[in-house]
Amino acid sequence: MKNHYVLTLAFMLMWLTFSAYQCASTEITSARLYIQQKNYDKAEEVLKKEIQKNPNSEEGWYLTGFVKHQKRDYEGMLEAFNQTLKIGKKYEREISQLLKASWAENFNDGVNYFNQANRSTNPDSVKILRQKAINSFNTAVKMQPDSNDTYRNLVFVYLTAGDLDGSMPEAEKWVKRVKSLEAFQIATEIFYTKAEQIWNKYYTTKNSQDSIEALKYYEKTEQLASEGLEKYSNDGTLNSFLFNTYISLGKRELALEKAKAAVDANPDDKFTNYNYGTMLLEAKDYEKAIKYFKKALEVDPNYENALYNIAACYINWGIQVREKEDEMNTLERTHKKYFEQSLGYLEKLAEIVPNDFRTWERLGQVYAVLGMKDKAEDAFRKADELRKKQG
C-alpha cells in the first residue's frame, strides 16, 4: 500500500508538470508551482483566491484537495474533492487514488496506535493511544466506507478497552455498510453479551427497568442474527446466538422449530447438530439431544462444546432417573449407568482442555457418584488449583 501511495504522488506531480504549460489562471499556475516546491501553505493561499474568484473551478477545488491531503487535513480534503466531483468528473481517477492512499495512511496509523497502546503500561498513555487509534480508523472509514478490515479494527479497539457500549454503534455501522459474515457475527455477539450483562444485573437488583433494558438488547440480537441468516443461512454462530436469544425471550418452541429446520437443511453440519442438541438439552429431552451431539462429534470428534454438553445430558439424565428411583423407593438403581456413559466424554475433554476447572469439577462429581474416591479427590484438587490460578 505504501508503494501504491508513492506511485500515486509521482503520478500527481508528473501531471502537475505537464499541465503547467496549459492555459490556466494566475492562481492555478502559482498553485502548481508552489505544490512542486512543496510549499503547501502558499499553494493553499492562492487556491483560496482562485475559488473565491471562480467557485466552479474544477481544478481549483481538486488542487485544494490535493494540498489538504499533503497537510493531512483529511476533512478538508474530502470537502474539496466532493466539490470537485459536483462540478465534473475530470479528476475522478486521481481522487480515487488519493482516497485509497489516505485510507492506507490512516489505517496504518490506527494499527500503530493500537499496538502502542497494547504495549504501554501507563494507563493514561493507553487511553490516549486508543483514542488516537479510534480517530484514525474513523477517518479511514470515511476514505473507504466499505472496508471490512477498518470496521473490524475499530470495533476491536473498543472491545480491547472493555468498552462494550462504545463498540455497539460502530458494530451497527459495520453491519449496515459492509454486511459481511464477520460483521454480523461480531455485532450479534456484542449485543447478546450486553443483554446477558443487564439480565444478570437484574437478578441482583430486581429492578424491573433492568429487565426491560435487557429485553431491548435481546430483541436487537434477534434482529441482527435474523438479518445475518437471511444472507448466511447456514452459519452456526448466528444460529447459536439466535437460539439462545429465543430461549432468553421465552420463545422456546420457536427456538426448537428453527433449530430443527436448520439441522434438516444441513444434517452433516456439526454446528446445526450441536445447536439442536442444545435446544433439546434445554428442553430436558436428553435421549434425543444425545443423538444430535453424537452426530456433531462424528463430524468433529474433538468438538469441545459437544463433548461438554453430551456429558451434561448423561449426567442430567442420571440425576433425573435417580430422583425417580428415590421417590419410588425402589431397590433397582440404574442411574449410575448414565454417569458411566458421561465419563469417557469428560475424560476426553480434560485431555483437550486440561486447564478448564469446570471440566475437572464435573469429573470429580461423576467419579464421586461412581464410588471412585481417589480419582474424585484428584479431580477436585485439580479444579481448585486451576480456579485459584485463574483468579
Image (cartoon, helix red, strand yellow):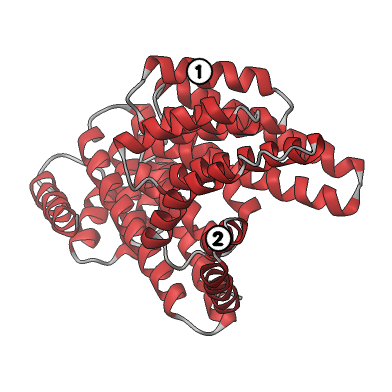
* Residue 340 pos. (x, y %): 50, 48
Decide if residue 83 is in sight here. no
Q: Residue at x 66, y 38 (%)?
A: 332
Relative height, residue 100 to residue 68 (above, below) = above
Identify the amino acid type marked 1: Lys
Q: Secondary structure at mark 1?
A: helix
Q: Which residue is mark 1?
A: 260
Decide if residue 315 is in sight here. yes
- Image quarter of the C terminus: bottom right
Q: Nearer the viewer, residue 42 or 216?
A: 216
Q: Secondary structure at mark 2?
A: helix
Q: Nearer the viewer, residue 237 or 375?
A: 375
Label 2 vs label 1, nearer the camera:
2
Q: Residue at x 11, y 55 (%)?
A: 10
* Residue 145 pos. (x, y %): 40, 39
* Residue 273 pos. (x, y %): 43, 28
- In the rendered view, does 204 fall on the left or right side of 257? right
* Residue 152 pos. (x, y %): 42, 48
Q: Which residue is mark 2?
A: 367
Relative height, residue 164 to residue 122 (above, below) = above
Precedes in sequence: disc 2 or disc 1: 1
Quarter of the figure with residue 87: top left
